Amino acid sequence: MGGEATLVETTDEEREGMRTVRLRVPARAEYVALARLALSGLADILTLPDELLADLKLALTEAVSNSVRHAYAGGAGFVSIAYELTGDALAVEVVDDGKGFDPERPPPLEGEELTEGGLGISIIRTIADEFELHSRPGVRGSRLRFVKRLRQPV
Ligand SMILES: Nc1ncnc2c1ncn2[C@@H]1O[C@H](COP(=O)(O)OP(=O)(O)OP(=O)(O)O)[C@@H](O)[C@H]1O
Ligand SMILES: [Mg+2]
């Protein structure tokens, strides 16, 4: 644990025409930029518009930052990020093996309560076309997944 090695792996899931790029980084703030860089690289390959890339980067940053800041309570750990290209969408999955939490406790999207607690999860939900968050307090791990539809086939 706590090692600085990173692993980047590209796989071709031919059956579903899905392409997935995986990145696993130490749960440290300085690696959030690496996750963003991978997204920029993919956006180049896909020729995504700047505005879409900016939205994706914001959502990704919030998701990875949560795993970095909240999952391991100052201890060492890793965050895994999968970038999945399917048809006309990009799905991003951010997984940690941290302490887990109650996803119902972060503020829901409906207005007033936004002042309570943080904004990260609400931002991701606003940007994403689909959103899933799986975690339970007292059970290790968290898996956040969001899907953004692209206005073009990829
Ligand atoms: N991966 C995670 N592991 C453990 N707890 C998490 C994780 N992600 C989120 N949380 C919990 O959910 C809360 C809400 O997250 P959210 O990103 O919405 O706000 P924040 O991180 O507190 O603040 P902000 O994102 O605005 O800086 C966090 O404060 C934290 O308690
Ligand atoms: Mg946050």
Image (spheres, rainbow, N blue to C red):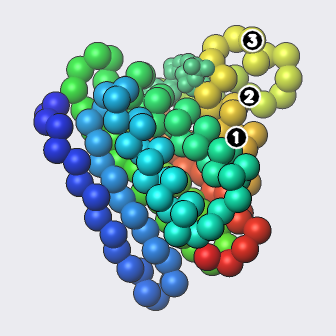
Q: Secondary structure at mark 3?
A: helix
Label located before the other in sequence (3 or 2): 2
Q: Give the quarter of the image for residue 60.
A: top right
Q: Nearer the viewer, residue 130 or 31?
A: 31
Q: Is mark 1 within 8 Å of ligand 1?
A: no
Residue 46 position within the rendered picture, expressed as x and y whole percent measured from the top left: 58, 69
Label located before the other in sequence (1 or 3): 3
Judged from this view, the residue extending furthest toward the top is 116
Q: State how far apart marks 1 and 3 are (Cα).
A: 16 Å
Assess whether mark 2 and mark 3 are in contact (beta carbons under 8 angstroms): no
Q: Residue 105: tell me if it is visible.
A: no
Q: Secondary structure at mark 1?
A: helix
Q: Residue at x 84, y 28 (%)?
A: 110
Q: State how far apart marks 3 and 2 are (Cα).
A: 11 Å
Residue labelled with disc 1: 125
Q: Nearer the viewer, residue 59 or 136?
A: 59
What is the three-letter code of the residue carrying label 2? Pro
Judged from this view, the residue extending furthest toward the bottom is 15
Q: Give the quarter of the image for residue 153.
A: bottom right
Residue 78 position within the rendered picture, expressed as x and y whole percent measured from the top left: 27, 38
Q: Nearer the viewer, residue 29 or 66?
A: 29
Residue labelled with disc 2: 108
Position of residue 99 relative to residue 24, above or below, is above
What is the three-letter code of the residue carrying label 3? Thr
Q: Label 2 crowding class (10 Å Cα cut-off): few <14, some 14-19, many 20+?
A: some
Mark identifier at residue 115: 3
